[in-house]
Image (cartoon, coloured by chain):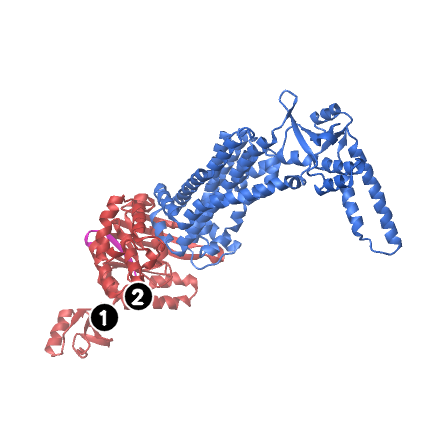
Chain colours: A blue, B red
Amino acid sequence: MTGTIAKYEFLFTIKRPGYLILTFGLPVILGMYAGFISLISVATAGAMASGLSAQIGVVDKTGLIETAERAAVEQKEQKEAAEQTAKQSGRSNKIPQLDALEAMVREVIPDAQRYDTLKAGRVALEAGEIDGLVLVPEDYLQNRTLDYYTRTWQMFKGLSAPQQVRRQLYVGVLERAELTAEERAMIESRGKGEGLTETAYYELGPDGKFLKVDTLSRTVSFVLPAAVAGILIVALLINAGFLLAGVAEEKENKVFEVLFSMVRVDHLLMGKVLGLSAAALLQLVIWGAMILPLPFLTFLVIDQVVDFEWHATSLLLAALFFILGFLFYGSLFVGIGALGNNVKESQQYSTIIALLPVIPMVAFMSLLNSPNGIVARALAWFPPTSAPAMMLRLATREVPLWDAAVAALLLIVGIWISVKIAARMLLVGGMMRGQSLNPLKMLRLLLNR
Amino acid sequence: MQIAFDGVSKSFGSGARRVIAVNDVSFEATGGTVFGILGPNGAGKTTMIRMLLDVFRPDTGRISTDGVENGNRSLSFRQRVAYLPEERGLYQKRKISDVIHYIGALRGMDREQIRTRMMPLLERFDLVDSIKKKVSTLSKGMSQKLQIILSVIHNPDMLIFDEPFSGLDPVNVRLVRELVREHRDRGKLVCLSTHMMAEVEALCDRVMMIDHGRRVLYGALDEVRRTNTDFQASVNKDCDPTGLPCVVRVVKDVDMNHVYLKDGATLNDLMRELAAAKRPVRRLVEGMRPIEDIFISVAGSAADRDATPPTKQADAAERSL
């Protein structure tokens, strides 16, 4: 019986105009959106990453950082003197020039550990005393290139760590180098060292030696699975929304009483969820067929530059969590769909559930940077947030298999509980007419025999 | 098919909010009969039907089908039953043929069986031309007809019709009446819940009336009418048997005079005395109150009971039998 319901739900769903528009229209819109975001990301990657910092060490072979710090101290003293004068003359403390000075001082106040030699810095890095080590080589003024060493290169931390050093160097160059007015103007126009310095990244290899990191390949390898995870989460939410609307519509059309006389409530519920799951999977296949050729062609063109590998296990696990997630959220959406008196009311009730898969997306930086950390694991093992959290974690390809298995097992238990609760909601809601619910009333109805 | 309720009770809520919807109800109904389920609004009829369909489970008591306890919980039972609820609904945005195929499939039919059964029913209810239309385009009467088609598409062994005549014009009322009789004559059990007492008298073989969740009337229709009638005969309005030797008293009703006979007097005695007295008798029937009167008197006494303390209601219900 569940199979019959699933088959008809699937067929009804894929004929819906909303489903067709979404399936064939969304890839186009997403493609345009992704292109736009990529452009912005490339232009502002440094600024974006500035909020993320790591404990770093610095080896400065040029003395520029020292110059910058000296300048900072001088500027601080100047500022204090100017403030004192302003106070004595009774003028406002808020002097625009002073605010600019203060900002400059804040930027160059050092918080990095200093090392005299590269060797000393590396020892500290390998010992875990610092997260990264920046080397300002002797030829920096000629080549404008820093070396950044980490134990394991992480995209956002990797970008952000040398940021402060770059600014210190910028101030140092301005203070120390004998520049013509034109050169100074040119440097200043490039803005706080953003375009002044290049960075070469190194990470500790398996043999204990530092190896140069191909950042473009690594970024693509990281961003692409994360994008796939994002698309899966969007598909999950949208199709769960279809389920909710379908059930609310059935209630509005008063068909539940007849349906309940024909099939058991839990069979009806599972049939609906499975039918919509199949429609959602079909949607993903269509999206894949529409979207994949674009990056595939891109890879062909830039194959020499980008070394990207699909990780089959992660992809399969992501698909598994997509299905489990759909069963979890879908069953709850079916139950909630029956509680409202119309589609609008049911959508209002569903807000609480709809927010659950958003939580891991809000915490996505933490999940991606520390995929096996406490936050990531807690979100992945807690059934209401498990599916999207796991899809994001899997994008990093650093999740142990046992960890994914525990998450899947807990989610299956969560599905069993959610199906029981949702079946009760479907029965109570399906038979209820014209009553608006508050949480207490809803609980009382659900607990009644 | 045969169904039986044995001491079935069902309540909702708890503590002060507890409402007893069905209270210790027992009855039996078998194939080849039309079984009327009567009662005022809120009496517990729909709850009883829902328990029979296993939408709700009883708190106490047993429900059996074909002698099998809890047989109503099986899939095969669901596929042998037709249900037309009072509050009807249809998938408004779907095509009629799609809806019929969906409901047919849920009733366990394959596509070929659905096609074979669908066309004669659509022809009978004059809906063949609408088969490709969306349900939302149908008039109220046509929607009602479609719902009736959906309920019998699988050739059920038992029909449960809750107010099947509401909203139908006289032509379609006749169609439904024929459908009910046809199924009864083919040995099916038809459970009919309705407030239209004329239809009860025209169709039902047996009836049960429930009130405040309790069974207050039960049995063959004629028997129920007879046992709830205290006069022995009725004659046409312009024939007044007052003063005849076998007559105790005459009560004048709207279109008939109801006659109370002396102990031991029979209808034959009355006929003979009417003829001898040359009274204009054109119609003489055994004294049986219309079921509508019985319904009103029972429902009326229920209204009176509403003013009495709840603990005394059960006793009052017993007395009204």
Where residue A192 appears, as percent x and y from the top left, is 72, 41
Residue B263 x/y as whole percent:
20, 70
In the rendered image, the residue lying farthest to the left is B276
Mark 1–mark 2 Cα distance, whole angstroms, equals 17 Å
The magenta segment: B184-196
Three-letter residue code for mark 2:
Phe
- Please give the name of the residue rendered at 29% of the width and 60% of the height, measured from the top-left corner: B142
Q: Position of residue A338 (x, y in %)?
A: 44, 52
In the image: residue B196, left or right of residue A245: left
Of circles 1 and 2, the one toward us is 2
Q: Where is residue B303 in the image (x, y as percent from the top left)?
A: 38, 67
- The vertical placement of A443 against A197, above or below, is below
Q: Going from the N terminus, do you reach mark 1 or mark 2 first?
A: 1
For disc 2, the neighbor class at 10 Å (few under 14, some 14 to 19, many from 20) is some
Query: Could you tell me which secondary element the residue under label 1 belongs to?
Result: loop
Compared across the picture, whether A371 is left or right of B311 comes to: right
**Which of these two is toward me, A345 or B13?**
A345
Q: Nearer the viewer, residue B111 or B29?
A: B111
Q: Residue B295 carries which label?
A: 2
Could one spot residue A419 in this view of the protein? yes
- Which one is in front, B20 or B245? B20
Residue at 72% across, 41% down = A186
Q: Name the residue under label 1.
A: B231
Does residue A381 show up? Answer: no
Total marks in image: 2
In this view of the protein, which residue sits in the foreground, B308 or B63?
B63
- Identify whether B78 is placed above or below B237: above
Q: How crowded is mark 1: few (under 14 residues within 10 Å), some or many (20 or more)?
A: some
Going 69% across and 25% down the picture, which residue do you hit? Answer: A126
Q: Does the magenta stretch include residue B168?
A: no
**Label 1 chain ID:** B
Extreme-right residue of the structure: A88
